[in-house]
Amino acid sequence: MQLEVGRIHIKDLAFSDRTYIEDGVLYICKEELQNYLKEDRNIADVDIEFARPNESVRIIPIKDIVQPRYKVKGGGQVFPGFIGDVETVGEGTTFILEDCAVITSGKIVNFQEGIIDMSGPGAKYNSFSKMNNVVLLISPKPGLDKHTHEATVRVAGLKAAAYLGKASENLQPDEIEVFTYNNIIEASTLYSDLPKVAYVYMIQAQGLMHDNYIYGLNAKGILSTIISPTEVIDGAIVSGNCAAPCHKNATIHHLNNPVILELLRRHGKDLNFIGVIITNESTMLADKKRGAYYTQKIAKIIGAEGAIITEEGGGNPETDLMLNCKNLEQAGIKTVLITDEYAGRDGRSQGLADVTPEADAVITNGNGNELITLPPMDKVIGDLESVEIITGGFSGSLHSDGSITVEIASIMGSLCELGYERLTTRLK
């Protein structure tokens, strides 16, 4: 299975009478994109703003972040199950707009939405401050319930990303990378002397808008299953997750999962990447156990000798994380965990809600309770007052001069448990 990714670097954004890319500038026909999105009758209005690197701009609240892309050839369409049919992806050629993202904002759906500062001390906590961002400010029709509101905004972001990605259709990419994923039999023959490594991809599927979608299907209730790594980075998984902004995987995180990318790049060199096992995170203990047992079963079937496990979210998902670790280790499969912590503002509290003795190799991406004061910005896209009700904010977060004091849990992607950012925790 082979996927060719063509990257087209976007250096700036501008409005125009048509949508196209020239000399690294993405020109957008604002009216055309607005009309396209307002075909959804649940959208009363949508405005579009730009946020560029180093600008004095704060975006709040943020629901999802999506990378624009276009399927040039091969099976399927970008974001299958939401855009076009449900034909599978992961092969052929896909063009992506690098250094560019679609951000969905507007009226708050749920308190677990986040912040991006494009400059200042907050900018160092996520990569999105270094991107050219197209921000959709979506106003839903009055009276829309929260679940419909979330779904409306989610699909609008995907549609906008697909619309913008199509502007790359006839371009020559700035760079091309080819990812090859061998089937298990081929890999076992070709790389019999290399350690067999599986990736256990925990994704939230807890309901109450803590959901993710695989080919448009809500992952809630699925049994652990195998998916090709090239399918994931080609758009098979979409976020509908309104968990805490610091450690929810936005759609852009799935599309650029650094664990998958690194394993693919090292496949056949110093390891044999034998597959991705998707397992969901439920709210029910029986479901957690079922998922962990079946993850172990699949890992044994495919002959895994080592595994990397990533968590999404925090709190009760740590039970899923530890059950998966315990079961794999007891099956003789060496595991490494990637997570984050909520260790209190002084860092002295227990960082994880659950632990197991088998979890002796853990990478942590920082403490979500750490406080930070972010200076005022010249421009706010969205609603600054929502800072006092989002995760990590509190009554008194917003100061009279427009500065804010929040836990870094409020910052989108700051503690991403896929290792997307650079924040970590070290023992002293």
Image (cartoon, rainbow, N blue to C red):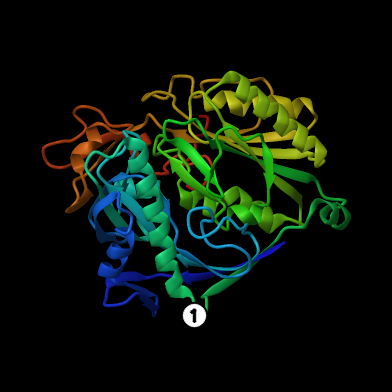
Q: Is residue 326 visible?
A: yes
* 101 relative to 425, above or below: below
Q: Residue furthest front?
A: 41
Q: Is residue 363 visible?
A: no
**x and y percentages locating residue 371 in the rendered image:** 32, 32
**x and y percentages locating residue 260 in the rendered image:** 62, 51
Q: Amino acid at mark 1?
A: Asn
- The part of the image, by quadrant, that contains residue 87 is bottom right
The answer to whether residue 199 is left or right of residue 390 is right
The answer to whether residue 168 is left or right of residue 274 is left
At x 59%, y 62%, the residue is 76
Q: Which residue is mark 1?
A: 170
The answer to whether residue 127 is left or right of residue 122 is right
- The part of the image, by quadrant, that contains residue 287 is top right
**x and y percentages locating residue 198 in the rendered image:** 72, 43
In the image, 284 versus 230, the foreground residue is 284
The answer to whether residue 83 is left or right of residue 244 is right
At x 41%, y 42%, the residue is 414
Answer few, some or many: residues within 10 Å of disc 1's Cα (few below 14, many 20 plus, some between 14 and 19).
few
**x and y percentages locating residue 158 in the rendered image:** 42, 56
